[in-house]
Image (cartoon, rainbow, N blue to C red):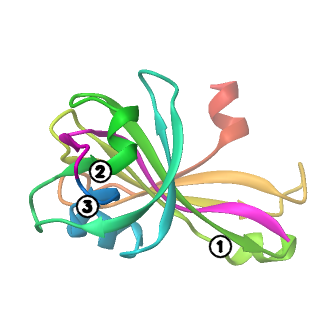
């Protein structure tokens, strides 16, 4: 078994920190639904400004609020305005990578969804486990694109 990315919110901006709350991270359920993150699911959080890395569980805030609020002890690791990466993971057999398609959302500074991406692993002539990123259509982006990371590095 290997641990893999299952869903990711990349570059979401922290909108609050509540030290006196009983713990967790509060997220907009619309963002979570789109990425596939569930309430009470444990996630890793990486602060892009400070480098702090924590693990906590998700609770849902108000739909449409675009909130990202660190609660309890987690509030000590981030400040309002910091950008964080929130990642859920799962354990799979290596061969299950071919059937896995993690959703990744990127964000604007106001926590609007900028890009909806899907990570894919496919067997290619280059290697048995090659990595691709698909850009999926959403409200602000109507094109679909797939690009190998190796091709991106060459370009």
For the point 58% across and 69% down, which residue is it? 101
Residue 19 is one of the magenta-drawn residues: yes
Magenta span dominant secondary structure: strand
Does residue 149 appear left or right of residue 114 in this picture? right
**Label 3 vs 1, first from the N-terminus:** 1
Q: Is residue 37 above or below residue 27?
A: below
The answer to whether mark 1 and mark 2 are in CB contact below 8 A is no
Which of pointers 1 and 2 lies earlier in the amino acid sequence?
Answer: 2
Q: Which residue is mark 3?
A: 138
Magenta segment: 1-20
Q: From the image, tell me which residue sits under label 2.
A: 71
Residue 152 placed where, x, y %?
62, 33
Counting from the top left corner in percent of width and height, residue 106 is at: 36, 45
The spot of residue 120 in percent (x, y) is 64, 62
Front-lying residue, 119 or 41: 41
Q: Kindly identify which residue carries mark 1.
A: 100
Q: Is residue 52 left or right of residue 36?
A: right
User: Which residue occupies 34% across, 32% down?
Assistant: 78
Numbered disc 1: secondary structure:
loop
Instruction: Name the mark on residue 7.
Output: none
Q: Residue at x 85, y 70 (%)?
A: 94
Residue occupying image coordinates x 41% and y 74% = 40
Q: CA distance from mark 2 to mark 3?
A: 30 Å
Is residue 106 left or right of 109 when viewed as pictured?
right
Q: Is residue 33 magenta?
A: no
Image height check: is 105 above or below 54? below
Tag in front: 1 or 2? 2
The answer to whether residue 42 is left or right of residue 61 is right
């Amino acid at each position: 078994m290997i641990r893999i990315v299952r869903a990711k919110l990349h570059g979401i901006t922290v909108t609050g920190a509540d030290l006196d709350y009983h713990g967790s991270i509060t997220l907009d359920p619309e963002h979570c639904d789109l990425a596939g993150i569930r309430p009470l699911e444990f996630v890793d959080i990486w602060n892009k400004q400070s480098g702090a890395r924590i693990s906590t569980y998700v609770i849902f805030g108000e739909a449409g609020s675009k909130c990202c609020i660190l609660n309890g002890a987690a509030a000590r690791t981030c400040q309002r305005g910091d950008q964080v990466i929130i990642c859920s993971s799962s354990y799979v057999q290596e061969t299950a990578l071919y059937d896995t398609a993690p959703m990744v959302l990127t964000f604007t500074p106001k926590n609007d969804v900028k890009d909806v991406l899907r990570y894919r692993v496919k067997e290619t002539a280059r290697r048995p486990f090659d990595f691709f990123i698909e850009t999926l259509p959403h409200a602000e982006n109507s094109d679909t694109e797939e690009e190998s990371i190796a091709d991106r590095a060459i370009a």
